[in-house]
Image (cartoon, rainbow, N blue to C red):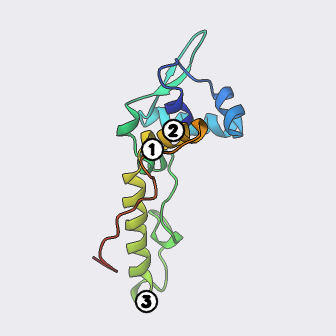
Amino acid sequence: MVNLACHSGEGPVTLKGISVEEGISLSYLEQLFVKLRKGKIVKSVRGPGGGYVLGKPAFEISVGEVISVVEEPMNPVACLDDGSTPCDRASRCTTQKVWKCLAEKIAEFLNSVTIEDLSMEAKAISGGGLESARPVCAVEQKGGFGS
């Protein structure tokens, strides 16, 4: 997604090109892009010079949305995943509240970072400086446990 955003305005980007630039398996990218297209995060362009482009502006696409669309769980423990086998200890689990709060914080953070943020950081790194990029890890501290 960051690769597409970095090449935005240059025309469609091929999966082969992303595979080479990012060192990601072409077959894995094909699987991901089927889901990203169904989720309307990317659009495919057919024909000569075809490939993929962002389906909406990079500032409207959060990292959390991308993860959700490709159906990757964001929970720190499997027992919180939808469709997981119910835990025998759920009713007496002393740590479940901690894991639920952590899952909420993870989702909050990932939803606060956009593909535009990451592409600006990538461009700044490749250009030699980070002055124009919004610091991705500048997370505001809020209250304590359960707030």
Q: Please state the horizontal and vertical placement of residue 119, each as a whole percent of the image.
A: 50, 38
- Can the viewer see residue 1 in this picture? no
Relative to 129, 144 lies left or right: left
Q: Secondary structure at mark 2?
A: helix
User: Of marks 1 and 3, which one's residue comes earlier in the chain?
Assistant: 3
The CA distance from mark 2 to mark 3 is 36 Å
Query: Crowding at label 1, few (<14), some or many (≥20) Cα neighbours within 10 Å?
Result: some
* Residue visible at 41% across and 45% down in the picture: 114
Residue under the image location 41 percent in, 47 percent down: 134
Q: Earlier in the sequence, mark 1 or mark 2?
A: 2
Q: What is the x, y in percent for residue 17?
A: 67, 27
Q: Picture quarter containing residue 39?
A: top left
Left or right, 47 with respect to 98, comes to right
Q: Nearer the viewer, residue 62 or 70?
A: 62
Q: Hey, which quadrant is residue 47 in on the image?
A: top right
Mark 2 belongs to which amino acid? Lys
What residue is at 43 percent from the left and 63 percent from the top? 106
x and y, in percent, of residue 108 in the image? 36, 60
**Which class describes the residues within 10 Å of circle 2: few (<14), some (14-19), or many (20+)?**
some
Residue of label 3: 94
Residue ID for mark 1: 133
Question: Considering depth in this image, is 74 or 144 the residue closer to the camera?
Answer: 144
Residue 50 rendering spot, x and y as whole percentages? 57, 15
Res. 104 visible in picture:
yes
Distance from label 1 to label 2 (Cα)?
A: 29 Å
What mark, if any, has residue 35 been given in the picture?
A: 2
